[in-house]
Amino acid sequence: MKQWMVKTRNLKKYYKQGNYIIKALDGVDFQAEDGEFVSIIGKSGSGKSTLLYMIGGLDIPTEGDVFVGGKNLAGISREKLAVFRRRNVGFIFQSYNLVPDLNVYENIILPIELDGAAVDEELVDELLDSLQLLDKKEAMPNTLSGGQQQRAAIARALAIKPLLVLADEPTGNLDTGTSHDVIGLLRTMAKRFQQTLVVITHDQDIAQMADRIVHMKDGKIVRG
Amino acid sequence: MAEIVIIAVLFTGAAALGIKYLRMKQDIYDFGTYLDECLDQMIAGKEMRRMDESEESMWGRTYDKLKKLDYIWKKQNQKNIEEKKQMKELISDISHQTRTPSANMKLYLEILTREDLTEEERRQFLRKIQLQEEKLEFLMESLVKMSRLETGVLTLHMELQPFYETLVRAVAAIVPKAEKKKIMIYVDCAETLLLCHDRKWTEEAVFNLLDNAVKYTEPGGEINISAKEQEIYTKISIRDTGKGIEQSRQAEIFQRFYREPEVSQKEGIGIGLYLTRKIITVQNGYIEVHSEPGKGAEFQIYLPRKEL
Amino acid sequence: MAVRSLKRNKAKNRMLLTAVILSVFLIFTVLTVGSTYMEMEKIQNIRQKGAQFDAVLVGGVTKKQLEWCRERKNITAVGLQAYSGYPEKTKKDSTLHSGLIWCDEVFWKKQMAPARDMVQGRYPQKENELMATRKSLKDCGMEHLGVGDSFEMTYTDHNGSHTKNFTISGIWDGYGDRQVFFVSKKFFEHSGYTLDQTRSGIMYLNFDEKDLRENERQEIMTRLNLGEQQYFEFSQEMSSWMEVMTGAAGLAAAICLSAYLLIYNILSLSVSANIRYYGLLETIGMTNWQIRKFLRRQMALLGAAGIAVGMSLGIVVSFRLIPFIVTALGIHQDDIHVVFHPAVFVLAVGVAAATIFMGNQNAIKTAGSVSPVDAMCYRGSSENRRRHKIRRGPVLWKMALEQIGKNKKKSAVVILSLAASLSIFLCLTTLIQSHGARTVYTNYMNEDLIVQNDTLLKEEKSDWKQIMDAKFIDSVRKLSGVERVSSLKRAEIVVPWSGEITETWLKKFYEKWQEEPFGEKERNEYKEHPERFDSFCYGISRQEFDYLKENENLKTEWKDFREGKTCLLYDGAMSLPESTFLGKTLTFWEDRQGSPEEKITIGDLVSEEYYGAGSGKGLVILISQDYMKEMAGALVFRMNISYKEPYDQETEQKVLQKIQETPGRKDFSYTSKIEDLKEARRAQGNMMGVGIGLTVIIAWIGIMNYINTVSGNISSRQSELALLEGIGMTKRQMRGMLVREGILYGLFSWLITAAAGIGITYVIYEKMNSNQIPFEIPWIWILGMAAIILMICALVPVIFYHIIDKKKSIIERIREIQ
């Protein structure tokens, strides 16, 4: 019996710009099952990023509901959402992922530290090793290549052992080979820890790697 | 005058400390109580008590973690149930699969006991039995392999070793079949390419893919094998110039006992690709297929360069 | 085009412009205050002294000393003055208070000139000519006379009393002692006085260098070979010149530093944006050279505008504000005029221009070193480290610390700026706070009011009057606010020749105060007429006795003192040898008809100058009041009054009123604790206000610097902060981190202030501390200011964060970089 980890119901997000209303999301019913790897693909402006940020609690819908792990995110304060994210959601952004003033290790354990929890150093080292970043443990982000930075971001997202991992165009700035690697890694890790993985991309090949592809256009889901 | 101020300040300070102490004591006590309750509920398998989530406090953190644990627990239980079901299905599959050859054999044996058979006919049927026996044997082997993989009984011997040798062995095994169909095999792999993998099983996985490729490629075609290191994974690509696989079927082909409708008569029981994927997955890699009907098929195996 | 681009980047340039204006204004104004103050003080000193000189030798001038001084190359002027007698009476007035002084040309023409407002006529040449002032003429009843007029005057010189007809050869007016008639050289020569006489000759010296070092001064004093009765002193300006210069230089430096930091900081903040702009210019085809020219023009315009406005503002404010400030700082003059020093102009313009130029060069250099495309995407460099050790500890503090250490240079600038502000505040408040203590002299025994009978200071015994009789004293005592009145009585006594006692006393006295040493002639005179050598005795109260006993470690017992068995001998600053006097019996009687002879033992020597006023050549002893009751001729010399409530203004008024009501009111003088305090407070109070005003302005620069930096900081960290919230930092934690950053800035600046600021303050303080008042920091003020700065430091980042947060949503900020 599979249950859904993420579910949106008639999700709408409208922006006002001058006299126009921009419909970033126009009634989206999205689902991701527990442990599933879903990719969302669409052109720029199709609303895919907006959807992701809604799921992550970074933005508030104009209309509709967002459920994550059974909880309705509506009505939860901004502060609590931050805490929720910190403990349950691993977020990977397109390029600006790491805090430039902290080294790799500090970046990875940052959410844990913010929580005031103890850091399992062994586990982190294992993670670093798997991602082939062990020798870069004390390096600063600006000395890493694009792929290495993304791997560090993955490490950070996984270090808190979340149930949900959200990635916004994680391979946008990477070459094909590295992109494939990064997504493959994400998928392997997610499967191993039984995490739900939602990845936004505009690259068909990357999207294909998922269990399920969702196509978006003009704020609506058109396929998947 | 100054003394009074100092005393007042000290007194206030002491009072504040006192209050803080009492508050802390209460907090710790509450923490213990909540923890007890939640653990009890988890042990009993009941629903956990509802509390405010995402609290920025020690208990809040612990509570959220307990909820997570509870969830994973329950999911694990689900998975176990699921696995048991799969086991049951596997057993029924096995019994189903073996029934046919076994039934056939029985039939042929029965026919053989008839007296009005010619020498020729007798020889024919004997060969048929032989074939079935081979099939049964093959089936048994595969099933044992599969069940081993499935139940996790087997232990892989992962070693950092040149992949070239593994590849060579797999290719060597397929060469006879390939030659028969006049299919050219090209290999592009550095001899120095090291990969952390289990030789025996990986060889088998590659062999299954090659077997497939040969099966579905027309005579005079090509099979291109290449191995390339990427940052995290090593990509092993097996490309054939065969008939290709339809988009809609690309997910199904990795299922157990799947057979393309067109080749149901040919030998094989449809677990080659399934096994291959299993072997690769167990080694923390993954496999992809890229193909269009009529344009051949490319299978890509990704294996982590270092142990994940 | 430069102008257009300037207009376009309004906000940024406005900031820069303001900074330039403020800096120029500040430097200019403050330094002009300084230069005005110094000039005014110089003038004030001259007027107080009555002449401009750097050192003075009093008590006679020997020929050798004169020659020596005239030969010295570094002595630019040697002026002489000599006492030539005093006028006794004229037809109009018989109590005259002026003196007859001769001075040489150097003194008259060079040294005294700055203190004179006007001169009519000429300096006396003939023996009967006088140079007078209105005041001196008024004093002898001749105020209606003018230049060329004559009048008859009886005067006394060394040779005796004479009456002559004098002609007024000139009249002058100005500052200094105006109760004086200047006489001709001939007159002086005939007066019987000579330059080398103790009471007569005075030499004034001017040096070419203002800052003679201690050893040089000592050398001069040694070389002059001063006699016992000679006294040499460097003028106040000379001795404090160094301190004043130091203080001024320190202040100027601090202000220039603040200004520099401010402008530099603003420039560097906008460097990133500028570089991007330059990159853009380059891509559309501007050559490097063109860009430079363009930029220079831009900066020149901005700089010129800022400097012009700042300077004009400074000039305007100077004219209005400076006189007020200078008065508050202690200059009491009517004709304060603002003094502009060219150096100030140069400094103000120079600092601003130099900073702008340097800052600009930096930007141009950086822009020139990267390709245009890179320049366009320039996001500001920080000293990127390759790696750093993992830091443990509370995460928010960690991140705050990291933030500060990220760009050490910038952080240092801000912290320095804040520390400078705090240090200046520290310095000024410490100095001002102690100014009162350092310059105020308290009354003897801290009495509230000491009233003195001036008639007793006169030389003629017949002039002595009892203006404070018992009735008067009683009436004062009866006043409701008066706690205690004690009177100091004085009686003239005669001490007969007593061998060693009188011998030693007189010898020492003559050495110190007289031209000729105590010789046979004088000894004989004393032996025969001891009454000619005025000896006095004072009757002191129990209270005074106890005071002296404690302060001077007396061995005498009160009982003996009270009963008249023992007395105290005033040592007259002559360092009398104790063995000669202590324990010896002194014989004396009151200088009245029929006074009995008394014998008393000398118990101790006291050096309290309070008892030295109005003495003659003879001994001065202190006896108890009880004992003194027996002396009928004793007159009340001084009256010490204590109020029930200290500083009781009302009571004092009543006392003063009583004084006014007595017939002898003209001959009263008094020193009042209240008035002293008022004076000190007034001086201090104004200074405090000015000091604080000044500091606030300077502090504002430091704070403006900080605010600027922080706002730029937060602004450029927008995306980073959004990212942090994305991975789960709550706003509360965010605020916490920013507050900690601010606090760290504050604490570091505290640290530097504590380390360097206190040290510098101490150094400056000691340089100005001739009264040896112990070094004390007004802690409350300092802690208060420090706390304020800390609060500002902590709050500013949070405020800016909120502003940014309101403007854009998280997503917008994150995606800004994407």
Image (tube, coloured by chain):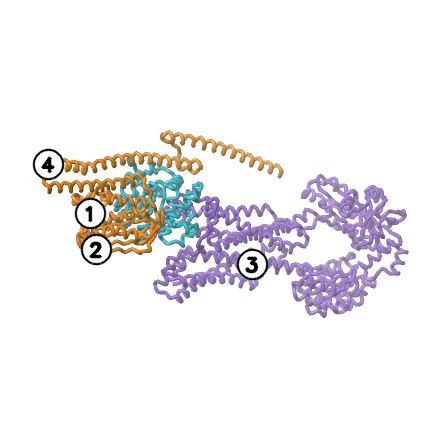
Q: Is residue C713 above or below residue C210?
A: above
Pointers 2 and 4 within a single chain: yes
Eye-nearest disc, 1 or 2 = 2
Q: What is the chain identity of the residue bearing mark 3? A: C
Residue located beneath label 2 in the image: B184
Q: Nearer the N terminus, badge 2 or badge 4?
A: 4
Can residue B80 be seen? yes
Chain (cyan): A
Chain (orange): B
Pointers 3 and 4 within a single chain: no
Eye-nearest disc, 3 or 4 = 4
Pointers 4 and 1 within a single chain: yes
The answer to whether marks 1 and 3 mark residues whose Cβ atoms lie closer than 8 Å is no
Q: Where residue C737 appears, x then y in whole percent?
A: 46, 45
Q: Is residue A147 above or below residue B76?
A: below
Residue C104 position by quadrant: bottom right
**Amino acid marked by disc 4:** Glu
In space, the residues marked 4 and 1 are separated at their CA atoms by 50 Å
Residue located beneath label 4 in the image: B115
**What element does badge 3 sit on?**
helix
Using the image, tell me which numbered label, if any, was put on residue C253: 3
Residue placed most toward the observer, C309 or C182: C309
Residue located beneath label 1 in the image: B246
Q: What color was chain C assigned in the picture?
A: purple
Q: Residue at x 87, y 59 (%)?
A: C522
In space, the residues marked 1 and 2 are separated at their CA atoms by 24 Å
